[in-house]
Image: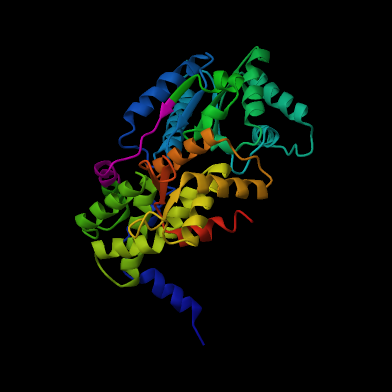
Amino acid sequence: MVDIKEMFRSEIKKNSVFKNKNIVSPHYIPDILPFRDDQIKEIILNLAPALQGKKINNLFLYGKTGTGKTSTIKVVLAKMEELAKERTDCKNIVTTYINCRNHNTKYRIILKHINDLYKHDYVGYSSSFVYDKLTEYVRKNKIGLIIVLDEIDLIKDVDDTVYALTRANDELTEGSISIVGVSNNVMFKQKLDMRTKSSLCEKELVFPPYNANELTKILQDRVQEGFNENCVEDSAIGLASAYAAQESGDARTAILLLLRAGEIADENKETKITEIDVRNAKKKVEKDILLNMVSTLPEQLQYVLFAITRLTKSKNQTTLGPNSEGILHSGEVYNEYYRIAKIQGKSPVSLKWFKQYLEELELYGMIATTISGKGVRGTTTLIKLGADAGILNSILEPKISI
């Protein structure tokens, strides 16, 4: 008979390379954010007038996954609220954070706010009622409400949502409502209608990917707080940074690699994390990394990637010769994408938008493209998948039924 309590005792007593494992979680938000000083200054410049009771511009933050958008805005807003409470010369500021993956309509977003603000459940009330309750709270309490809409591109009625929240200021005699939109999709704002663009994108801020040196510094900070002294070799940090820089400049990927490498070291009862542990960690988390990247892509972009993945799996080479394994033509990819979108009951995008989707997938490191020379079905874009087709297929196939 297994002694469960004894097994627990043994587990918590064993040696570990970790000092504080939570620090090495990709979800941990440090108080100091390296290499984001410029972005922080721009955000503060935009938000500071709210502390004086002035209406501020709406803000739009965009950049690839793992570039620090969400962490930065959360840290800045938390400090802003602290300052507003400490000083008598500052107006009352209330900041809220909504992940639009979970609250993806105007009604759900406003309902979440009034439920939290009033500490009461208003489920079932009409859209106009919940809207009026939100503006009533802002006006009566004379607050500056700053709403962060993370993954704003996932809101189904995004134009109506942004218009409603920004229009509220026309009705407010006291207080104000401002929006901070956050998106991984660099093409997102191009699809907004003109009314929404003018209200949401009053101020735009780009978060560039981290390079290998920056990722190394980020990991060194996490190592100092999260691991026991001298438990992580410098070469292991460098390798994790290099892998993440090659993928997409994603800090979360770098941190996740180090976390998994530490777990592998513990499993093997090692006292140090080495390059070998990082390499093994990469194999172990490759699907997790791809899943994280794919899940943040807009729906239509996932259809394009699925089309490329299916075609890559279905044939090993084209008529271009023995060294062209996995090369696809943009025309055949568009036809497959068109078929997939139709099966999903969605309207396929035009060829113009399709080409922009290819550019975005290349930006994320998912594919590589080049223009063919004359004579190969004319001049066309050649496409090659930049990730394992089998892993991508296992991620996308359950999400997209065909």
Give left or right: position of 275 versus 13.
Answer: left
Task: Report the front residue among 306 and 177.
Answer: 306
Residue 14: x percent and y percent? 34, 71
Magenta segment range? 205-218
Residue 10: x percent and y percent? 39, 75
Look at the image and tell me whether residue 272 can be seen.
yes
Task: Report the front residue among 317 and 16.
Answer: 317
Q: Quadrant of the C terminus?
A: bottom right
User: On screen, 278 above or below 170?
Assistant: below
Question: Which residue does the image show at 47% across and 21% down from the upper left?
Answer: 203
Task: Report the front residue among 297 and 103.
Answer: 297
Residue 246: within the magenta? no
Question: Can you name the residue that lies furthest to the front here?
Answer: 375
Residue 371: x percent and y percent? 37, 40
User: On screen, 77 above or below 138?
Assistant: below
Q: Quadrant of residue 136?
A: top right
Question: Which residue does the image show at 67% across and 36% down from the upper left?
Answer: 105
Q: Quadrant of residue 31?
A: top left
Question: Which residue does the image show at 35% across and 42% down from the upper left?
Answer: 373
